[in-house]
Amino acid sequence: MSHPVSDEINRSGSHASGTADCQVCAAIAAMVRGGGLRIGSARLPWAGRLPPIHDRREVRSRQTILRPGETLEGVPVICDGWAARVARLSDGRRQILSFLLPGDLVSASAVFASSVNFYVESITAVTHANFIREEFQAKLLGEPKNIKALMGICVAEQEEADRLVADLGRRRAEERLARLFLHLMERLKMRDMVQDHAFALPLRQSHMADATGLTPVHVNRVLGTLRDDGIIELSGGTLRIANLLKLQRLADVN
Amino acid sequence: MSHPVSDEINRSGSHASGTADCQVCAAIAAMVRGGGLRIGSARLPWAGRLPPIHDRREVRSRQTILRPGETLEGVPVICDGWAARVARLSDGRRQILSFLLPGDLVSASAVFASSVNFYVESITAVTHANFIREEFQAKLLGEPKNIKALMGICVAEQEEADRLVADLGRRRAEERLARLFLHLMERLKMRDMVQDHAFALPLRQSHMADATGLTPVHVNRVLGTLRDDGIIELSGGTLRIANLLKLQRLADVN
DNA sequence: CGATTGATTGACAAGGTTCAAAGTGAGTGG
DNA sequence: CCACTCACTTTGAACCTTGTCAATCAATCG
């Protein structure tokens, strides 16, 4: 069976070859199946053939993948697992800027700059590929259509951030968590990772706290009320939205 | 005296001509003097000659300039005055996403999309120009250098938003206000609008509240303590940083 | 098994909000 | 020029949401 993605990868001489090649193929294939590289809901719809990768890395859960200012080997894309972009304050406070899901470009800025100004940390075990920047750029800048797609990713990234700013600035704990869950569900839906209003949620309560600007203790309490109200069921790493309508009303969608 | 900017504007047949042309020239000249179009600290360093504008508008203070979804006539750039990008929740809560100063492109997204998903509201009286999108794009996409400059603006916009997310999620009132003031001072410095640690600050306390995710009453109290501690002097629309070191320590810079 | 990590709970403190009222200042019309 | 109005600032008091501290419980892992 012909497989343009893995063909391309296998042809690229520079990537780390090992025993896990088919994993990479599978992961990137999944990415493509999901509609191309993305950030949030924006896509980079490349026709079949990806640029060559510099390398591919597998990282255990709870590791720091990138640090601010650190030189990037390539343009990082998440193949598998969950990661987060995070900001750290000097006294250790943390804020999750966004979650990175399979198929996500870590940041549009990484396409042009050789470093970023946030941390990237794995939440689960993560596989990520680093595309060769020059080739990635060349492919993008070659076609106006691709430039616009990249701008689309930038805009989506920005809209995401604006949404989060309004959430953190003006919404209370319950609303923030409700919106977090709905937002994640939307993104996972696009990847066919939601079944019957339920999906794997590998986040600790401290992750949810860092994403919503709350403390883990308070997240715990709010989750408790959401559970008691029959809105969500959360256990064993699986979140099931038991009452979507109520959750949406809480989250102030529509 | 030859003046490439106003020459260009005068040559452009499609812009609204009136009695205030020299105002436009002056405003855009100021913009150029300041280093080109920008967002935050990123610049679009166009060599002397701007693309033609579709029109130019003057708006009184406290008006809504743009609404989400509304069709944009062109690519809006602030020539004079202060405006804000703002998000509104369904129940009326407001969050200021960013302040727009003279020379600011309202949003990089406006270059490619014909609508945006936030409000733009004037704070003072505002003059803004709307560049013809096709020409603006053509000029940008024509040169790879310009594409990278545009991407630089996108990245700066994003970094701004990330910074704000961390502030709103993880910093307390005093820190947020301190950072707001320092951030504004930096931006105004680039425009030569700061003298001796003092600058015109046309914001009401409710603006500061909407920018920092606080209530106006609490902003008032915190301003009171900053004043009492001899850190700032704020009156008559002028902010003077009386003790920069203390303010920076509060703001957790460095 | 002991050790570690995360979830849960209680008691209490604090930061920030809400409501209400009074003070201030600039602009307006008479 | 004065009184009036309107928008904004300031202040107090009560309240509420969220944070802090501390202890316990549950689950996982070498």
Image (cartoon, coloured by chain):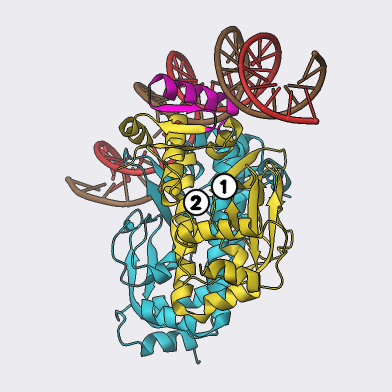
Chain colours: A yellow, B cyan, C brown, D red
Which chain does the numbered disc 2 sit on?
Answer: A
| Element class at badge 2 | helix
Where residue A128 sits, quadrant-wise, is bottom right
Q: Position of residue A213 (x, y in %)?
A: 55, 36
Residue at image point 49% right, 88% down: B3
Q: Which residue is mark 2?
A: A161
Give the secondary structure at mark 1.
strand
Amino acid type, mark 1: Leu
Q: Quadrant of residue A139?
A: bottom right
Q: Contact, CB < 8 Å: mark 1 with mark 2?
A: yes
Q: Quadrant of residue A137?
A: bottom right
The answer as to whether the residues below labels 1 and 2 share one chain is yes
Q: How many marks?
A: 2
Disc 1 target residue: A97
Q: Residue at x 73, y 60 (%)?
A: A18
Residue A224 covered by magenta stretch: yes
Report whether A72 appears left or right of A1. right
Residue B161 spot, x, y in % from top left: 53, 53
Q: CA separation, marks 1 and 2?
A: 8 Å
Residue at image coords 53%, 70%:
A4
Region of the chain picked out in magenta, as a range: A214-237
Q: Is residue A16 visible?
A: yes
